[in-house]
Image (cartoon, helix red, strand yellow):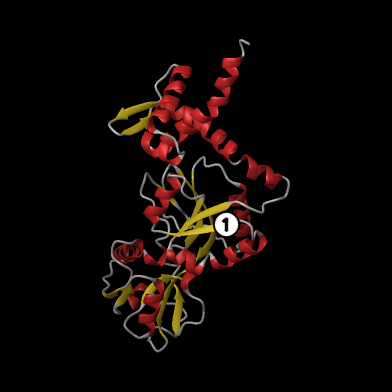
């Protein structure tokens, strides 16, 4: 009889750890309560029970926001894979038995990635796993990272220039920087061009706050050259159309080029870095069976397309899915 309370306590431990992990991810007891469909007082009591068990303080409380203490961070690193593993146990078991025939996969990506990179792998994935519900979230880079950190999506697909400490990035395909011109442009027939030859012509670039413009500006300044922008336009399809109309030339990543455009194209990899696209995830995230299957699909389809460029690692200034929009 004396073991009864102890068994009951162990049965509650998963609930306590689940509440703790959601509070750690969201930085809010109320947000955690909303995600796991409990009341705020219940979540608070579960966290307090863990603090009593481990004789420590797990969160610093600052008004409505909470932040992990060093001890809380340690417990989070240990508990998170356990909680996610238990929550995904049924799906993982089905996968090990060779049955990945249901479930949900949430993917975040920007418009360019959805338009140019994902159609083929999505088609292959849907054909192979028709019972898995696939949800595509068309979001900006900043919003995509926020969704990853809040576990609202399983993974993101896009291009990262800098990688925050809490994010992992595994590139699977690389594209070339390319100058595009109207077919009748003086540069169109050249096998290669220099920046000096490009400089006199007006450029069509994405909005100034995105990374394409900043990269063009940096490269021209490094070569002590000026340049002029005649048109600012958002979206690769828009930029290609206006270049076709003769309103300027542009520097893009050739992911957006299908070969059907009425454009001249010249590689610029002697001046600009190649652009990789890859799988973006929260570090330590439990990989669901559906996620693993989608990653295998990407690897299979792009097995010969990766020439990995250098990727900088920085604090918290990530941009995935800037693509040709930045």
Residue 153 on image: x %, y %: 48, 50
Residue 134, image quadrant: bottom right
Q: Residue at x 67, y 61 (%)?
A: 128
Q: Relative to 173, does residue 254 appear above or below in the rendering? A: below
Reading the image, the residue beneath label 1 is: 133
Q: What quarter of the picture does the C terminus occupy?
A: bottom left
Helix, strand or loop at label 1? It is strand
Query: Left or right: where does residue 205 sit relative to residue 105?
Result: left
Q: Nearer the viewer, residue 168 or 131?
A: 131
Query: Left or right: where does residue 130 sit relative to residue 79?
Result: right
Q: Relative to 279, does residue 46 appear above or below in the rendering? A: above
Question: Residue pushed farthest bottom?
Answer: 184
Residue 151 on image: x %, y %: 47, 45
Residue 254 visible within the image? no
Query: Left or right: where does residue 272 sit relative to residue 154?
Result: left
Q: What quarter of the picture does the N terminus occupy?
A: top right
Residue 28 on image: x %, y %: 36, 36
Q: Relative to 235, does residue 290 appear above or below in the rendering? A: above
Q: Nearer the viewer, residue 217 or 277?
A: 277
Question: Residue pushed farthest top?
Answer: 2
Q: Relative to 309, does residue 13 appear above or below in the rendering? A: above
Residue 141 on image: x %, y %: 39, 56
> Dot 1 surroundings within 10 Å: few (below 14), some, or many (20 or more)?
some
Q: How many marks?
A: 1
Q: Residue at x 39, y 48 (%)?
A: 146
């Amino acid at each position: 009889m004396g073991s009864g309370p102890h068994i009951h306590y162990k049965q509650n431990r998963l609930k306590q750890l689940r509440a703790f992990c959601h509070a750690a991810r969201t930085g809010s007891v109320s947000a955690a309560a909303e995600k796991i469909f409990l009341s705020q007082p219940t979540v608070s009591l579960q966290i307090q029970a863990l603090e009593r068990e481990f004789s420590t303080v797990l969160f610093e409380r600052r008004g409505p926001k909470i932040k992990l203490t060093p001890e809380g961070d340690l417990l989070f690193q240990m508990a998170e894979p356990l909680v996610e593993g238990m929550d995904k146990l049924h799906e993982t078991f089905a996968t090990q038995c060779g049955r990945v025939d249901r479930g949900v996969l949430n993917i975040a990506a920007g418009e360019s990635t959805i338009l140019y990179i994902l159609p083929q792998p999505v088609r292959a994935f849907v054909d192979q796993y028709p019972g898995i519900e696939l949800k595509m979230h068309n979001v900006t880079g900043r919003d995509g990272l926020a969704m990853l950190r809040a576990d609202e999506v399983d993974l993101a697909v896009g291009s990262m220039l800098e990688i925050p400490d809490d994010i992992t990035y595994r590139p699977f395909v690389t594209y070339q920087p390319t100058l595009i011109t109207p077919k009748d442009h003086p540069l169109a027939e050249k096998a290669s061009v220099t920046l000096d030859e490009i400089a006199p012509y007006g450029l069509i670039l994405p909005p100034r706050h995105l990374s394409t413009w900043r990269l063009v500006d940096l490269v021209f300044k490094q070569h002590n050259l000026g340049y002029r922008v005649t048109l600012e336009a958002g979206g690769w399809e828009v930029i290609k159309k206006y270049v076709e109309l003769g309103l300027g030339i542009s520097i893009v990543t050739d992911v957006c080029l299908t070969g059907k455009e009425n454009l001249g194209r010249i590689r610029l990899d002697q001046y600009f870095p190649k652009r990789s696209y890859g799988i973006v995830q929260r570090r330590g995230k439990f990989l669901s069976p559906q996620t693993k299957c989608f990653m295998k699909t990407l690897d299979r389809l792009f097995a010969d397309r990766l020439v990995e460029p250098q990727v900088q690692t920085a604090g918290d200034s990530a941009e995935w899915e800037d693509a040709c929009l930045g």
